[in-house]
Image: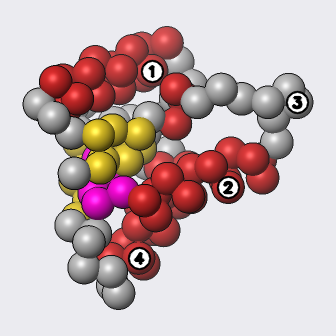
Amino acid sequence: MRIYFAGPLFTPYERKYIDQCAARLRSEGFEVFVPHEIELPNPVTAKFIFDVDSKEVMRANAVLALLDGPMVDDGTASEIGIFWAAMRSDKSKKGIIGLVTD
């Protein structure tokens, strides 16, 4: 099963927590895409980020979304929405899991 791991990536803590979770999932045999693991071009553009992330969301069978904080991160919300829309017509899309630790 391929999992898209969505979540805020702005602080070292957020990235480290997502990395630790992804490593655990991988050790259990899941294929996990983590957006901050890709190499970015210089200069990076919003279009590049959207194109890569939306393609990977569409390849996933499930989305795991880190929802910590006072509000859901904008990018995470977009990724959830893209996947939810795909779930309506694609039976390979199994579901969205929200992860809250705070």
Amino acid residing under circle 2: Asp
Name the residue at 85% across, 26% down.
42
73 with respect to 5 (left or right): right
Residue position marked by numbered label 3 in the rendering: 43
Residue 62 colored in magenta in the image: yes
Q: Main secondary structure of the magenta part?
A: strand
Is disc 1 in contact with disc 3, using a CB cutoff of under 8 Å? no
Residue 6 colored in magenta in the image: no
> What quarter of the picture does the C terminus occupy?
top left
Q: Earlier in the sequence, mark 2 or mark 3?
A: 3
**Position of residue 3 measured from the top left corner of the image (x, y, whole percent):** 30, 47
Q: Nearer the viewer, residue 91 or 20?
A: 91
Is disc 3 in contact with disc 4, using a CB cutoff of under 8 Å? no
Q: Residue furthest bottom?
A: 89
Q: Earlier in the sequence, mark 1 or mark 3?
A: 1
In three-dimensional space, the C-alpha distance between marks 1 and 3, rounded to whole angstroms, equals 21 Å
Amino acid residing under circle 4: Ala
Residue position marked by numbered label 4 in the rendering: 86
The label on residue 51 is 2
* Viewer can see residue 67: no
In three-dimensional space, the C-alpha distance between marks 2 and 3, rounded to whole angstroms, equals 15 Å
Query: Mark 3 packing: few (<14 Cα in 10 Å), some, or many (20+)?
Result: few
> 68 above or below 56?
above
Query: Mark 2 packing: few (<14 Cα in 10 Å), some, or many (20+)?
Result: few
**Position of residue 97 measured from the top left corner of the image (x, y, whole percent):** 22, 53
Q: Residue furthest right?
A: 43
Amino acid residing under circle 3: Pro
**Position of residue 25 measured from the top left corner of the image (x, y, whole percent):** 19, 31
Q: Earlier in the sequence, mark 3 or mark 4?
A: 3
- Which residues are the magenta region? 60-65
57 with respect to 4 (left or right): right
Q: How many marks?
A: 4
